[in-house]
Image (spheres, rainbow, N blue to C red):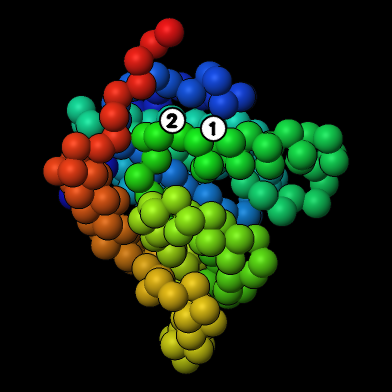
Amino acid sequence: MRLDAEFTASALEYSACPRWSRAEVALAGRSNVGKSSLLNALAQAKGLARTSKTPGRTRCLNFFTVGAALALVDLPGYGYARMGRAEAAKIAALMREYLRLRPNLVALAILIDARRGPEAEEFALAAEVRARGLDLIVVATKYDKLKNSARAAALKRFAPLESAPIACAAPTGEGVERLRGRIRECARRESAAGRPKPIVAA
């Protein structure tokens, strides 16, 4: 069953994040990992998140509400070589603030190209998420690009993350419903525990 997501707000700085009591599940990954395509697949809405042939288009935090209690957060992509150093540092600082300080954040889905496997940036993100006691969802994207004979070996490269990856392919829908289920599960668990606490406007 699709996630009925609707774009709500963008934040160029942490202080501009929405003040609400929704549980947030964020999506992070390299600039060319297929984050927008997967977000559109989760919602079954082609135009929900803008896709581009040029990586690195997302430069802010994009918030999408789902129902009455959940929000998906599209984080800026990282690892795009053509981005200026100053802008890259600003985006990195924004992501760091959000991941370390945002009380609404209950889970982070790290999207990793199945053909490449996790590298230093993904291990650092996973460590930061675990340090906060948040749920970690590992997603192997572009799974359809792998030959069947190469799939098992590719997924073995994810083992050091110590979280079984969800193999996904946005064009075919493979793994998408499983990912929807994990996102809903994280939100339900936090709701049952009485978290997150509402952010009260100043």
Question: Farthest residue in the right direction?
Answer: 85
Query: Which amino acid type is shown beneath numbered disc 2?
Result: Phe
> Which residue is more in the foreground, 56 or 105?
105
Image spot of residue 132 (x, y percent): 45, 51
- Residue labelled with disc 1: 61
The residue lying at 19 percent from left, 37 percent from top is 194
Q: Position of residue 21 (x, y in %)?
A: 29, 26
Total number of numbered labels? 2
Numbered disc 2: secondary structure: strand
Q: According to the image, label 2 marks what residue?
A: 63
Alpha carbons under labels 2 and 1: distance apart: 7 Å
Indicate left or right for 1 with 26 as reference: left
Q: Are marks 2 and 1 in contact (CB under 8 Å)?
A: yes
User: Which type of secondary structure does the marked residue at label 1 adopt?
Assistant: strand
User: In the shown orientation, is residue 190 left or right of residue 160?
Assistant: left
In this view, the residue in front, 76 or 7, is 76
